[in-house]
Image (tube, grey):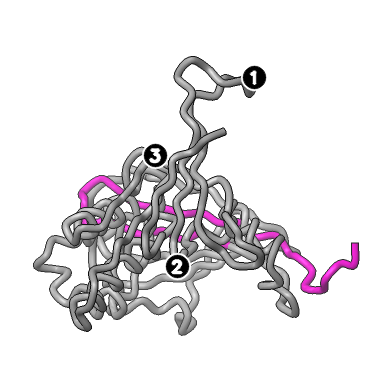
Amino acid sequence: MERETLDVDVLIVGGGPAGLSAALRLTDLQNAHGGEPLSIALLEKARESGAHMLSGAVLDPRALAELIPDFRTAGAPIEADVVEDRVYALSAGSRIALPIIPPPLRNHGNLIISLNRFAKWLSTRVEAAGIDVFTGFPGVEVLFDGERVVGVRTGDRGIGRDGTPKDTFEPGVDIHAKVTIFCDGVRGNLTKQLLARLPLAAGREPEQYAIGIKELWEIPPDRLAAGTVIHTLGYPLRMEEFGGAFLYACRSAWSLVSTIAIRSSIPTTRSSA
């Protein structure tokens, strides 16, 4: 099958905050040091930037301030500045507020954001910087030359449910790059291909993953002040499980961005199987 090819200097896979920030940083370095302009391309599988990112998040703004010093006046979509932290231990019918907030859960100076809106905003800046952003193009295969990564193949289009090509079939494109940056997430398909092919995880502890539920709650505007961050532990988890809930109150009068994560206990020893 003949495929179109595209040659770039740098290919970034994944249009989340990591990939978009990498693209902006590369343009900053290019502007600072001059030389021949770099051709940079960014692949994002969603139809538009941020469409697959539904979480609320608490953001430490230090890295963002280094990347975009005027991010507030530049229109960064900040939902609220964190004004209060709370931590509760829950049982089936009651709660106990921790009198001391553990250091990892102290968020003074941090910001509450919607990852969806934040990624969309970063994407507009990336496109304004002259970087090619290809949305709706999932990367499906890492291209190798021996043990060297030389690019990524995008997915074929126009495939029927039975796996056969339809009349609208279009083969994916091979994007060749001198440098490929993988930002497709901790369980990204291309990252898993890399780990299977190259010994990147050799001698490392195994990864651990959480089972999570993400929700957007509507609450009365006087129920919870914008900028309140609540963490919980205990119920409904069992004693042998670790995890809890994360609630972030937004500035919008009726919205509360909530992420509830349940993390099961996972042995840290490697299996020989």
Which residue is nearer to you in this view: 181 or 176? 176
Picture layout, residue 58 above or below residue 187: below
Q: In 3D space, how far apart are the residues under numbered discs 2 and 1 (Cα atoms)? A: 36 Å
Secondary structure of residue under mark 3: loop
Residue drawn at x 23%, y 69% as measured from the top left:
37
Q: Earlier in the sequence, mark 1 or mark 3?
A: 3
Which residue is nearer to you in this view: 203 or 230? 203
Which residue is nearer to you in this view: 191 or 148? 148
Mark drawn on residue 162:
1
Amino acid on which disc 2 is placed: Val
Q: Position of residue 6 (x, y in %)?
A: 39, 49
Amino acid on which disc 3 is placed: Gly
Check if residue 260 falls in the magenta segment.
yes
* Left or right: where 201 falls relative to 80: right
Mark drawn on residue 136:
3
Residue drawn at x 68%, y 68% as measured from the top left:
198
State the extent of the magenta-drawn residues as a range.
244-273
Count the numbered circles shown: 3
Q: Position of residue 246 (x, y in %)?
A: 46, 61
Mark drawn on residue 179:
2
Corner quadrant of residue 204: bottom right
Q: In 3D space, how far apart are the residues under numbered discs 1 and 3 (Cα atoms)? A: 21 Å
